[in-house]
């Protein structure tokens, strides 16, 4: 198979593109990753260089090759019940104490293929029971959102799901679907997934009781992080909670947030 080589100036073009569009900071170590992920698109279009591909991509209409490049340059690693301490905290400190009469609203703000949002849905359904709740999932990558909407996963990716929830909320694939798992329709229907670029204005999404913003801040520099957090905190209700990933921090970001435990914050009640 033809191997393509990316030059330093070509790499800079893609690096600037994904930074300007998504805030994702690709360091020079990501050169090999960019080469391998985009090479298939050069083959697909029968192109000879990354410069040709870049020109084609930037001229493409919305949703076209530009979106494919974004899909390929994002890292979408995720799994069910990732960072279980967050689920324990949510259950013990928030859900079991929940007394509000209104719908409990939760946002999985870089949801990837949906494993995080469905894990949260299982927990909310189990703990809140008849109390109304809704979950909104969003991501910049349309490819992963499609997967999230389907709620259909390979069985080797479901390790984190408690047995009780597997029985209650998941259907085991048979026949041609052997080795897969489908999130039960009744649960799936309660989630909404929509494309959203956290670097751009967020639009009308309403106010949330809880926002999960996990394992995406690591791709941003301080300027982008500050802007993203500011926008999201505006979407939190007073007293609402923000969860970030365990390897992430809000150091240097001055928002109206109180740290409860590492990586879990609460918006000031008076805000
Ligand atoms: C590593 S995954 C994290 C998924 C999940 N939150 C978790 O912790 O398992 C990071 C996700 O952030 C998304 N992402 C990156 N930049 C983004 C942006 N500017 N706006 C929205 N989503 C973005 C990627 O597409 C990717 O699916």
Image (spheres, rainbow, N blue to C red):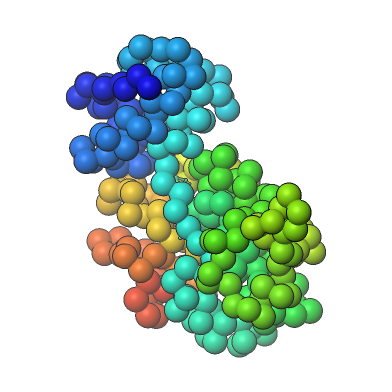
Q: Where is residue 96? Give x, y as percent.
A: 62, 87
Q: Report the residue at 47% width, 76% height from top.
A: 84
Q: Nearer the viewer, residue 18 or 53?
A: 53
- Residue 126 in sight in this render: yes
Quarter of the figure with the N terminus: top left
Left or right of 267, for residue 190: right
Figure label count: 0
Depicted 206 relative to depicted 41: above or below:
below
**Image-quadrant location for residue 247:** bottom left
**Image-quadrant location for residue 100:** bottom right
Depicted 15 relative to depicted 261: above or below:
above
Q: Report the residue at 25% width, 27% height from top.
A: 12
Q: Nearer the viewer, residue 233 or 94?
A: 94
**Image-quadrant location for residue 257:** bottom left
Left or right of 71, for residue 99: right
Depicted 97 relative to depicted 102: above or below:
below
- Residue 57 in sight in this render: no
Q: Where is residue 192? Give x, y as percent.
A: 68, 54
Depicted 92 relative to depicted 1: above or below:
below
Q: Where is residue 161? Give x, y as percent.
A: 58, 72
Q: Residue furthest front?
A: 175
Q: Report the residue at 31% width, 21% height from top.
A: 4
Q: Nearer the viewer, residue 29 or 66?
A: 29
Left or right of 35, for residue 69: right
Q: Report the residue at 71% width, 75% height from top.
A: 167
Q: Where is residue 86? Give x, y as percent.
A: 47, 75
């Amino acid at each position: 198979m033809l191997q393509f080589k990316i030059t330093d100036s070509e790499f800079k073009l893609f690096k600037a593109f994904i930074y300007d569009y998504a805030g994702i900071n690709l360091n020079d170590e990501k050169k090999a990753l960019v080469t391998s992920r985009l090479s298939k698109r050069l083959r697909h279009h029968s192109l000879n260089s990354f410069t040709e591909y870049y020109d084609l991509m930037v001229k493409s209409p919305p949703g076209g090759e530009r979106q494919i490049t974004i899909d390929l340059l994002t890292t979408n690693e995720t799994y069910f019940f990732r960072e279980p301490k967050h689920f324990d905290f949510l259950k013990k400190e928030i859900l079991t104490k929940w007394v509000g009469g209104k719908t409990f609203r939760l946002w999985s703000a870089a949801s990837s293929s949906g494993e995080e949002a469905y894990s949260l849905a299982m927990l909310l359904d189990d703990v809140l029971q008849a109390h109304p709740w809704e979950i909104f999932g969003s991501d910049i990558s349309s490819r992963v959102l499609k997967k999230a909407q389907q709620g259909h996963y390979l069985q080797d990716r479901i390790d984190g799901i408690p047995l009780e929830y597997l029985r209650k909320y998941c259907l085991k694939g048979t026949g041609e679907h052997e080795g897969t798992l489908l999130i039960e329709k009744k649960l799936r229907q309660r989630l909404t997934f929509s494309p959203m670029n956290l670097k751009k204005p967020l639009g009308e999404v309403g106010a949330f009781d809880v926002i999960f913003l996990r394992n995406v801040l690591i791709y941003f520099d301080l300027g982008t992080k500050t802007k993203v957090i500011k926008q999201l905190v505006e979407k939190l209700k007073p007293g609402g909670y923000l969860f970030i990933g365990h390897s992430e921090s809000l150091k240097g970001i001055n928002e109206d947030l109180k740290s409860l435990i590492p990586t879990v914050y609460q918006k000031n009640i008076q805000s």
